[in-house]
Amino acid sequence: MGGRLSAGVVGAYVVLTLLILLVVAPRSEGRYAWVPYLLVGFTVLFLARYFSTTYTLNDTHLVAWRILGGRRIPLEDVRAIEYASLRDLVTTGGVFGMGSWGWRGRMHSVTIGEFDSIYTDASAGLLVTAGAYPLYISPRHLQEFARELSRRVRSYTGSLAKDVGAPEG
């Protein structure tokens, strides 16, 4: 399943790319004329990472993947599945101050400590607690994904203390 995509985010990448190409590139001269094209390359790479974000459930693992990065979680290691908002988890410093645009996606929350994030939507997602660091994801069909993840995790571990996908809620 892919991540929930935002027209605003895609539009921002497109506008940034056009600004670099139409405003910055024509004014660049000499030794640094290549810099705007390098910036466009980075912008296109980050847009490709945004589009490539996918979440896969198989019999043994939850895999959150994007170009040049991802995380694989054994279902037997999952301890909690909760609805979350990245905006609530990271209440200080804003998104830019917390490394959301960073390559790895490691963030810090005053409530849960450090966690990983592989997401496309900061407003609604799942916080999957497993291993050393919880993982924030934002699958396209959030409730269906939570139910299926919960079903597969319960086949390994039984009921979880926090499980938004369980039949009892």
Image: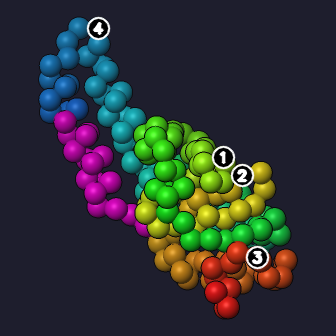
Callout 3: SS: loop
Question: To which residue does mark 3 refer?
Answer: 161
What label sits on residue 114 in the rendered view?
A: 1
Badge 4 density bin: few <14, some 14–19, many ≥20, Cα 10 Å? few
Q: Select label 4 or label 3 by which is in front.
A: 3
Say which residue appears at 55% left-offset and 82% top-offset. Answer: 144
The x, y position of residue 44, in whole percent, is 37, 42
Q: Amino acid at mark 1?
A: Glu
Residue 22 x, y percent position in the rendering = 15, 33
The residue that mark 2 highlights is 133
Stretch in magenta: 1-19
Residue under label 4: 31
Number of residues whose C-alpha sits closer than 10 Å to that of mark 1, classed few (under 14), some (14–19) or many (20 or more): some
Q: Do the residues under discs 1 and 3 have CB atoms within 8 angstroms?
A: no
At x 54%, y 66%, the residue is: 84
Q: In the rendered image, which quarter contains the C terminus?
A: bottom right
Residue most extreme to the bottom: 167
Between marks 1 and 3, how big is the CA–CA gap? 21 Å
Task: Of the two numbered discs 4 and 3 on the same chain, state the one appearing first in sequence.
Answer: 4
